[in-house]
Amino acid sequence: MVHLSKLLHAKPQEITTLEARVLSLRVQVFELEEADEDSKAKITGLEQRSTSLEAQLDRAKAEFRQQAKRFEEVEADLTGDVLDAYDEGFKDALTQVACVHPGMDTTPFSASNLVENGKIVPRVLP
């Protein structure tokens, strides 16, 4: 009988211990579910931010390509202007030389030539 009494007394304690463990596990599950929801929210935020940054990068690339194209156009215009000015200046100087030396043949002279080792040679462009 004492043995049965001890068993009856032990069972509620065992139930209380198991309920405490179950409660602890339920708290852990709740905390893990909260952490999971927070993680999902962070992932969604990061995905949205990533999409936004990709769009900004695409816009920046497009803008850079436009600026590069404009730079090339301006560079070509300026290079043409400089070459035209150089050519006009050379022609003006050659005209002045022909004025001082009227019988001189100016046909061998060109802005595209240069002097190497005392000889007039065509300029080789890179």
Image (spheres, rainbow, N blue to C red):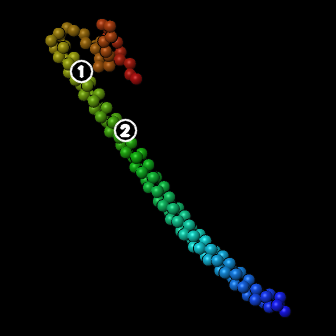
Please identify the residue farthest to the bottom as the structure is shown.
Answer: 1
Drawn side of residue 45 relative to residue 94, left or right: right
Residue in front for this viewpoint, 109 or 124: 124
Q: Helix, strand or loop at disc 2? A: helix
* Residue placed furthest toward the left: 100
* Residue 44 at least partly seen: no
Tell which circle, 2 or 1, labels the residue nearer the N-terminal end: 2
Residue at the spot 31% in from the left edge and 36% down from the top edge: 77
Q: Quadrant of the N terminus?
A: bottom right
- From the image, tell me which residue sits under label 2: 72
Quadrant of the snapshot with the C terminus: top left
Above/below status of 106 relative to 21:
above
Q: Label 1 crowding class (10 Å Cα cut-off): few <14, some 14-19, many 20+?
A: some
Q: Between 30 and 24, which is closer to the camera in this rendering? A: 24
Residue 51 percent location from the top left of the image: 50, 59
> Who's the residue at 54% across and 69% down the image?
38
Q: Nearer the viewer, residue 52 or 13?
A: 13
- Residue 91 at what x, y percent from top left? 23, 21
Q: Nearer the viewer, mark 2 or mark 1?
A: 2
In the rendering, which numbered label is found on residue 90? 1
Above or below, 36 against 74 in this view is below
Within the image, what quadrant is residue 72 found in?
A: top left
- Marks 2 and 1, how far apart in space? 27 Å
| Horizontal side, residue 126 vs residue 44: left or right | left
Where disc 1 sits, the SS reads helix
Q: How many marks?
A: 2
Q: Name which residue type carries label 1.
A: Phe
Q: Residue lying farthest right? A: 1
Callout 2, which amino acid? Answer: Glu
Residue at left offset 40%, top offset 49%: 63
Q: Residue at x 29, y 34 (%)?
A: 78
